[in-house]
Image (cartoon, rainbow, N blue to C red):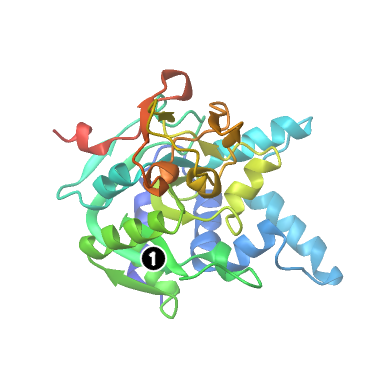
């Protein structure tokens, strides 16, 4: 029997411009078997040789990203599947909306060709899912249930197909998870995917050691967009303790002769270092060259 979440994804897909049967099948596979999907994508799962041609054929059917060179292939993949870095306050705003919201399109906020809209239906429907990236690692960061699936039809679909690894949570618990993950030094990413109705569907709380998207970005696939901020150090307050250097998940901070050096091109504006600084010497400032922040609170005023 086809479940309510599956039917809702199909019906919503029929109303989405440019979303076809292949997209639905891709979204179904991705949402139905996220651990297998992510495990294969990150190389944590290995397919026996006899099954590799079959998997290759399915991949070509669901992921038509053919291009003449590797750089173009990587960009096309990122256009279809990417995350937007968000400071904690912005992520909290996204999980505490009291009304539906539509931001269409969001080119300036999410600089990708596709999968960039925010269409939140029933925004208080939130599911905590065991992180597929962490779950596929041999020694994962804990806890596991930190991926937040937000709004419909995604929340119902995910909990319907992964009942042992997903649970309904309140908006208050979503905020608690975000804050606890920030305190662990992890980054909030608002994720967008073409097969998930070409729009936002989840907030992942990512650690640099387990996250497949952060790993892909380090290897040349531009899956992550800056928050639109960069960190700023207040003169006279930094004592060179290196707490922020140790905390930075993007390797953007260095101590040089006792002074903090900020590599602004590497900084993604996540705010992890701001939370880690014991002297409140750091803050985030707008960086127009890095794109616009994703601020749904401003959009609904």
Q: Quick one: which residue is furthest to the right in this view? A: 49
Near-viewer residue (84 or 11): 84
What residue sits 46% from the left and 54% below the top? 185
Direction bottom: furthest residue: 164
Q: Where residue 111 sits in the image (x, y, percent)?
A: 48, 28
x, y (%) of residue 175? 27, 58
Helix, strand or loop for disc 1: helix
Q: With respect to residue 259, does 87 lie above or below?
A: below
Q: Quadrant of residue 71?
A: top right
Write down the residue under mark 1: 157
Disc 1 residue crowd, few under 14, some 14–19, many 20+, Cα 10 Å: many
Mark yes or no: residue 10 visible: no
Residue 184 makes an appearance in the image: yes
Residue 38 lies, with reference to residue 191, above or below; the image says below
Between residues 127 and 287, which one lies in front from this camera angle? 287
Residue 98 lies, in percent from the top left, at: 15, 50
Quarter occupied by the C terminus = top left
The x, y position of residue 41, in whole percent, is: 67, 56
Q: Quadrant of residue 72?
A: top right
Q: Which residue lies at the image location 39% right of the left edge and 25% below the top edge?
A: 235
Along the line of sight, which residue is nearer the eye, 84 or 258? 258
User: Who's the residue at 37% across and 36% down the image?
Assistant: 281
The quarter of the picture where residue 169 lies is bottom left
Q: Is residue 247 above or below residue 42?
A: above
């Amino acid at each position: 029997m086809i479940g309510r979440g599956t039917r809702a994804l199909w019906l919503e897909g029929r109303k989405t411009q440019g979303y076809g049967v292949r997209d639905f099948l891709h979204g179904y596979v991705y949402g139905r078997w996220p651990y297998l999907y992510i495990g294969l994508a990150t190389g944590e799962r290995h397919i026996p040789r006899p099954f590799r041609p079959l998997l290759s054929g399915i991949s070509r059917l669901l992921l038509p990203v053919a291009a003449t060179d590797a750089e173009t292939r990587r960009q096309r993949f990122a256009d279809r599947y990417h995350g937007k870095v968000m400071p904690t306050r912005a992520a909290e705003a996204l999980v505490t909306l009291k009304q539906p919201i539509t931001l269409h399109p969001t080119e300036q906020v999410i600089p990708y060709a596709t999968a960039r809209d925010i269409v939140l239906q029933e925004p208080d429907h939130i599911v905590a899912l065991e992180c597929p990236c962490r779950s596929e690692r041999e020694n994962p960061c804990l806890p596991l249930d930190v991926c937040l699936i937000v709004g419909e039809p995604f929340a119902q679909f995910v909990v319907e197909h992964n009942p042992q690894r997903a649970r309904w949570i309140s908006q208050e618990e979503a905020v608690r998870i975000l804050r606890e993950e920030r305190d662990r030094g992890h980054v909030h990413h608002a994720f967008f995917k073409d097969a998930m109705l070409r729009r936002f569907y989840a907030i992942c709380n990512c650690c640099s050691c387990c996250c497949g998207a952060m790993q892909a970005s380090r290897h040349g696939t531009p899956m992550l967009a800056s928050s639109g901020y960069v960190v700023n150090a207040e003169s006279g307050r930094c004592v060179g303790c290196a707490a922020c250097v140790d905390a930075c998940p993007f390797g953007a901070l260095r101590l040089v002769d006792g002074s903090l050096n900020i590599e602004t091109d590497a900084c993604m504006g996540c705010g992890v270092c701001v939370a880690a600084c014991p002297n409140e010497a750091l803050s985030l400032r707008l960086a127009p060259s890095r794109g616009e922040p994703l601020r749904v609170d401003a959009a609904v005023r």
